[in-house]
Image: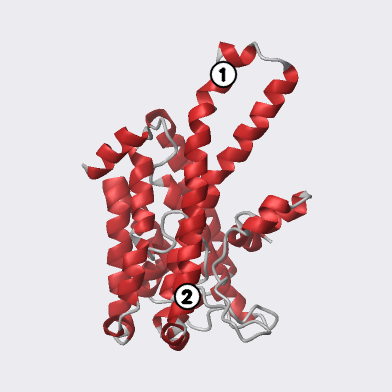
Amino acid sequence: MVSANIASVIGVPEGVIKLLLSILIGYPLALLHRLPLFYSAPSTLKHLVIFIEGASICYYNFGIDTVHMWLNVTIIYLVILLCGGSKFSVIFAFVFNTCYLVIGYYTQVPFQDFGISWTMPHCVLTLRLSGVAFDYYDSKRKTADKDVLLSEKPGYIEMLGHSFFFGGVLVGPQFSLKRYLNYVNGEYADRKISGASDSIRTSLEKLMVGMFYLATFQLLALYIPDSYLTSSSFHDLGFLTKCALITIWGKNALHKYVGVWLIQEGSLILTGMSYNGVDEKGQAKWDGCTNIKVWQLETGESFSDFIQSFNVNTNQWMA
């Protein structure tokens, strides 16, 4: 396989290469989604195409284990269908998905040497499905955020498309079902077409910066691999040298997350889903699905700066 050959040359697990290829394929898919043939198609057909794309990506990475994701989407849909936007739906969605994920982690530990298995996208799915239940429940509250609440009960094919959207199915970021439906219904289409060069440029910038972070991670990992920290050579070093190496190793460990999130965000920008209005100068903002704020992360001086700039969408969801 191509992924196995690339992995052997670079010196990383094949699962990592599959993951990277699956994220990168989001760019040609995003270009296809920009075609008039797609955005003028019926919404139901769009949902179906998006579901097939995402399910295929998951199957390429995890095989038959992809059924875990489909099963969870189906169960949460049935709960919302039968119980509506009730407290029971919210509690059940959160508890069921979380417990399912924890059991998945427990059963995968003996068989995984590297942390890429079906539980990785399932972690994203757990928050996404819980968010759907919360957003439908919040439709009864006058103080709820109108940008995310669901005034109507979500359909099954809508939830499948939202859960398996190629721009966030593997590593995130989180985005509301409302934003996804707005995208499918063409509410961002005018901006996506008239501002095409703007979104393409921003998308490619995210791609290049993300690839830089991944390259930096891989290069530094060659000099300070994980195994070195438990070796006798490291044990014999002085205290200050150990502290310096651990600091470099820890900082570098974040680079892989920053890299994949930036690359993934770039594909979302290219689809148009990240459109977030305009700034005071009338320039389009493409930060609607931002999950990492690089400059704030690299220059921050407090834990607050770190929380506000790393895994942004998940932290906002938890807040």
Please state which of residues 222 and 130 is positioned toward the viewer in this rendering: 222
Q: Please determine whether, in this image, residue 238 is positioned above or below residue 297.
A: above
Q: At 37% across and 63% down in the image, what residue appears? A: 166
Q: Earlier in the sequence, mark 1 or mark 2?
A: 2
Choose top left, top right, bottom left or bottom right for residue 87: bottom right
Q: Please determine whether, in this image, residue 282 is positioned above or below residue 225.
A: below
Judged from this view, the residue extending furthest toward the left is: 1
Please state which of residues 198 and 177 is positioned toward the viewer in this rendering: 198
Residue under circle 1?
230
The amino acid at mark 2 is: Ser
- Measured as percent of width and height from the top left, residue 86 is found at 56, 71
Residue under circle 2?
199
Q: Please determine whether, in this image, residue 151 is positioned above or below residue 76.
A: below
Q: At 52% across and 71% down in the image, what residue appears? A: 176
- Measured as percent of width and height from the top left, residue 178 is found at 50, 77
Is residue 151 among what the camera can see? yes
The amino acid at mark 1 is: Thr
Question: Callout 2: 10 Å neighbours few (<14), some, many (20+)?
Answer: many
Mark 1 or 2: in front is 2
Disc 2 is placed on an element classified as: helix
